[in-house]
Image (cartoon, grey):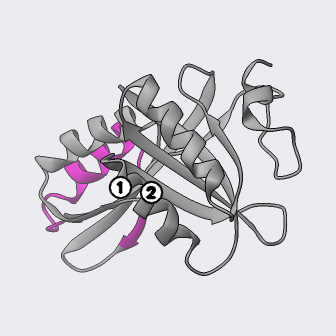
Amino acid sequence: MHHTLVALVEDKPGVLNRVASLMRRRAFNIESLTVGRTDEPGVSRMTFVIDGTQTGIDRVVANLYKLVNVLQVDDLTGTPAVSRDLALVKLSASPLSRARLHRTIDEVGGHVVDSGTSTVTVEITGEPPRIDHAIDRLRALGIVELVRTGATAMARGDRTIKADAAPAAAVVGQ
């Protein structure tokens, strides 16, 4: 089962390496990993999508807390959450195919962010399954290059994860 973990970490060199090494040692494949700044200076937010059993995930969470630079961890699996992914897709675009290309881009909810003489670059954002569907539709038009950010997620409603909040175990029950 895929699990979405969110960790707040100190924004210091080597933290990403220590966290990724922990996942490697525990033999978890990271399906997706995003890291970005938060509203708190010196704190970054990591979002992992990993495959594993609940017991294994619980072990990973416990081990993450043992890392000195990890401030807070939350498992969003089974929690109502907003999850988004971004894909940039460069498509082959001859003058004759551009009308069909733009029609398909509109149908999948994409936005043209760059255009060259023989290519068009499209941005697609949304839940990961929506991105998968859009890429499948665009593949028939001739994908030249593709990159995805990976999922980033946040709990819905009033539930938050903050560096100065109570430990994740206390937050999960809310």
Quadrant of res 95: bottom left
| Disc 1, SS | helix
Residue 25's disc is: 1
Q: Quadrant of the C terminus?
A: top right
Task: Tell me the residue at 65%/49% (across/down).
Answer: 65
Q: How far, Cα to Cα, is label 1 from label 2?
A: 5 Å
- Residue 59 on image: x %, y %: 50, 36
Q: Nearer the viewer, residue 162 or 166?
A: 166
- Residue 80 on image: x %, y %: 63, 21
User: Would residue 15 appear left or right of 9 to someone viewing this image?
Assistant: left
Task: Tell me the residue at 79%/72% (across/down).
Answer: 42
Looking at the picture, does residue 58 appear above or below residue 87?
Answer: above
In magenta segment, residue 95: yes
Looking at the picture, does residue 37 appear above or below residue 107?
Answer: below
In magenta segment, residue 136: no
Task: Tell me the residue at 15%/49% (across/down).
Answer: 139
Quadrant of res 128: top left
Q: Amino acid at mark 1?
A: Arg
Q: Amino acid at mark 2?
A: Leu
From the image, tell me which residue sits under label 2: 22
How many numbered circles does the render carry?
2
User: Would residue 100 appear left or right of 62 to someone viewing this image?
Assistant: left
Task: Tell me the residue at 84%/28% (across/down).
Answer: 158
- Residue 134 on image: x %, y %: 30, 40
Badge 1: residue crowd in 10 Å (few <14, some 14–19, many ≥20): few
**Which stretch appears magenta?**
93-114
> CB under 8 Å between callouts 1 and 2?
yes
| Disc 2, SS | helix
